[in-house]
Amino acid sequence: MRFGPQMALAVIAVAVVAGSGARAQARAARPDRLSAIYMYHHVSPLVLPGRYQRALTMTPDEFDAQLAWLKRRHCRLLTVDGMLSDVRRLAARAPACEVALTFDDGYEDAATFAFPALRRYHDVASFYIITGKVGAQGHVTAAQIRALRAAGMEIGAHTVHHYDLTRLTSAKGAREIGSSRTALEHWIGAPVLSFAYPSGRFNAAVVAEARAAHVRDAVTTVPGFVGSSTDPLLLPRYRMLHGKGLALFRATLGPPQGEHAKGWHLLQSLAPLDRRTLAGIARKRIAGNAPQRAEAICIALLERRFPEQILKVHLLAMQPAAVAGILLSGVKFHEAMNARRFRADVRSMVRTAFLSDKALDEVDVWATVPIAVGAGLPVSGDFAVPASRTVFSTAVTATGHASAARQLTWGAEYWDADWTRDLTPAKAVSGGRLRRAESR
């Protein structure tokens, strides 16, 4: 399996809600009727060594305890497609708690351990299969896929090779999506309409490819609840991690009636921030003459939980153009950083901004680091001395109609030589080198 740039942060750092009012904030953030999707990978008694394998593996006992907890919480378990249909059809009359469990990649243990547990509890789930891995060691076979489908499980596409679709041409991305659907439909003899973006990586072009491939709904790795107005091709999901599943359920769904919410500080450290809280953070970090648009972009960026600190999002809208600026801190990253990772994250930020605001014409990104200022020197006003210096910058423009897939032109990149050298390790980019403009 290939992990996207945000994988490590999702594993080790989810948002922390602090302060004496944390419990009230979290309770207020949850809607009265809860519909949420949760993402699993492995359910196996064998927890392999390694940071990611361990994080993404639930033991059978863990999974059984989670299914039992959902029963006590009176949550109705549905497939992703079933949940989306229920939310839209029933609206206010939907059950108070609806949950969809999803299993990515098509690992064999999903069929040998997760599937029997679901059957014991008379529950269903959605299984997203990498078709190029079907029959390979450690992955499901076509016969197992048919057995899952026959038992009422949903079978969804997850591409042929699990490539990052944002890095493929539109033609190759369309083939990855379409071919995986075709193979699955051949094996199960039924339409396959649900899809999972590999590693949660998507942009406007990828969403357009999914739509063109007749995908009806698609799941991301952006946390959040599903509502009647949720875009069916951008469904949010919460990531389930080893040893923390029940805590995440309690934090997002609330405890069953009569159960004390133990360890509230831990639950809050596991709970992704709700949109209301993110909006409050975003409003303190925006500038420009289009605050609502800037806030929407800032929220979208904060939801992705990049390890780089987002200091400010500027948006200047003046006919005939709208330009967004993303200011990053070049110090105090939330995890180890190198030039390759930094560039990948910047590109993800740019794509996220364009996807969030389809009327944008340009996105500029720059990073700064503080510099020492002599005692008594002014740091504001007309005679202020510089208190920071730019260590990275780039500009990206978009062409094409806002309602369709847009072509992005990536401008030259500036890398400060000393700053780049200090990144650990910094093998991908030479300090100070300007990258020629390129188009995707």
Image: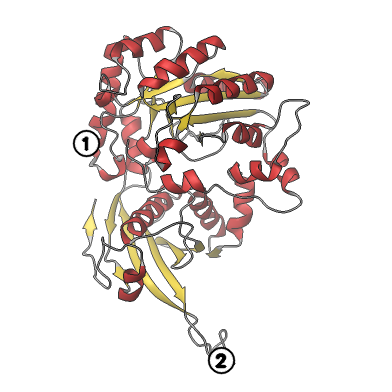
Left or right: 117 as drawn, with respect to 437: right
Q: Position of residue 330 (x, y in %)?
A: 43, 68
Q: Position of residue 286 (x, y in %)?
A: 55, 62
Q: Which residue is mark 2?
A: 377
**Which of these two is toward me, 318 or 306?**
306
What's the residue type where badge 1 is placed? Lys
* Quarter in which the N terminus is drawn: top left
Crowding near pointer 2: few (<14 within 10 Å), some, many (20+)? few
Q: Position of residue 420 (x, y in %)?
A: 33, 69
Say above or below: 277 vs 216.
below
Q: Position of residue 182 (x, y in %)?
A: 26, 19
Give the mark count: 2
Q: Residue at x 31, y 43 (%)?
A: 166
Say above or below: 146 vs 170.
above
Say above or below: 201 vs 112.
below
Q: Quadrant of residue 360?
A: bottom left
Say above or below: 111 vs 262.
above
Crowding near pointer 1: few (<14 within 10 Å), some, many (20+)? few
Q: CA distance from mark 1 to mark 2?
A: 57 Å
Left or right: 214 as drawn, with respect to 249: left
Q: Earlier in the sequence, mark 1 or mark 2?
A: 1
Q: Quadrant of residue 218?
A: top left
Contact (Cβ within 8 Å) of mark 1 with mark 2: no
What's the residue type where badge 2 is placed? Leu
Q: Which residue is mark 1?
A: 172
Q: Residue at x 44, y 64 (%)?
A: 325
> Can I make out residue 207 in this image?
no
> Can I make out residue 244 in this image?
yes
**Which of these two is toward me, 34 or 70?**
70
Report the coloring of the rendering: secondary structure
Badge 1 marks a residue whose secondary structure is helix
